[in-house]
Structure formats: structure tokens, C-alpha cells
Amino acid sequence: WVSREVALLPFEIFKVFAVLGKRWMLSGNVPAQFFESRMISLAKPGKVNALNQISVKHLRPITVMSVWWRIWASAWAKGCLREWMRQHVPRHFAVAHAVSTGE
């Protein structure tokens, strides 16, 4: 899945996904597939030689994870940040920030 495809899904799917995410958090049992990733190496510009070869030191590793993991982890992190702000940021600052940014 890529983000363009996920954006086209019916909203009901995200409601179900939210319910599942809560269950995973309560049980402490996150699907193993969320921890799978694929690493690819991108060549740094101008480092491939005339024989189309490149040294490992001129590669940049990129790790790609599931779009569903990124959605879930992002929602979890935002919730944690919200809770931390409630506990540590003075209310008048948080309200002023929300008003000025529209959040």
C-alpha cells in the first residue's frame, strides 16, 4: 500500500483500524507484520563508476515500513504527545498555541 491508495479507502476502515489499534495496545500484542521492513540502498549522486559499480561507502540505506504501521505509530505518538502536553505545558500556553495555529 502507498499513501495515495490508503487515502482512497472508505472512512469506515479507519474506524475499524482504530478499534484494532486499541486492542493491540491493551493486549501488548502488535501484529508481527508491523515490525517487518525492507531496506534498500540508494547510490549517492555521482558515485557510480564507468563500469556501473559503486562502493558500499557510497550507498545510503533507506528503510521502508508498512503504511499501516506508520499510520498507527503516528496516531499513538500524537496521543502520547497530547498527554505529555496536558501534564507539562501550562494550559494558557497550550490554548494560545492552539488559537494561533488553528490546531
Image: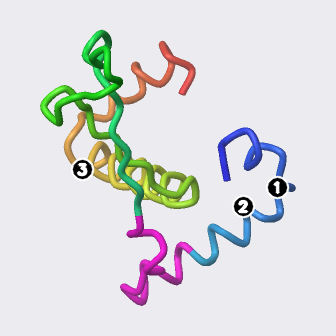
Asked whether, in this view, residue 20 is left or right of residue 38, the answer is: right
**Secondary structure at numbered mark 1:** helix
Tell me the CA gap for discs 1 and 3: 31 Å
Residue 95 drawn at (x, y percent): 42, 27
Quarter occupied by residue 40: top left
Q: Earlier in the sequence, mark 2 or mark 3?
A: 2
Vertical placement of residue 59 versus 101, above or below? below
Mark on residue 11? 1
Quarter occupied by residue 46: top left
Amino acid under disc 2:
Phe
Q: Could you say which is closer to the camera, residue 27 or residue 82?
A: 27
Tell me the CA gap for discs 1 and 2: 5 Å
Amino acid under disc 3:
Gln
Q: Which residue is mark 2?
A: 14
Residue at 86%, 56% in the rendered image: 10
Vertical placement of residue 58 versus 35, above or below? above
**Secondary structure at numbered mark 2:** helix
Tell me the CA gap for discs 2 and 3: 28 Å
Vertical placement of residue 92 versus 67, above or below? above
Residue at 47%, 25% in the rendered image: 98
Of all residues shown, which one is farthest toward the left? 57
**Secondary structure at numbered mark 3:** helix
How would you classify the magenta stretch by its main secondary structure?
A: helix
Residue at 32%, 13% in the rendered image: 45
Residue 59 drawn at (x, y percent): 24, 31
Q: Which residue is mark 3?
A: 87
Q: Is there CB contact under 8 Å for labels 1 and 2?
A: yes
The span shown in magenta is 21-36
Of all residues shown, which one is farthest toward the top? 46
Q: Earlier in the sequence, mark 1 or mark 3?
A: 1
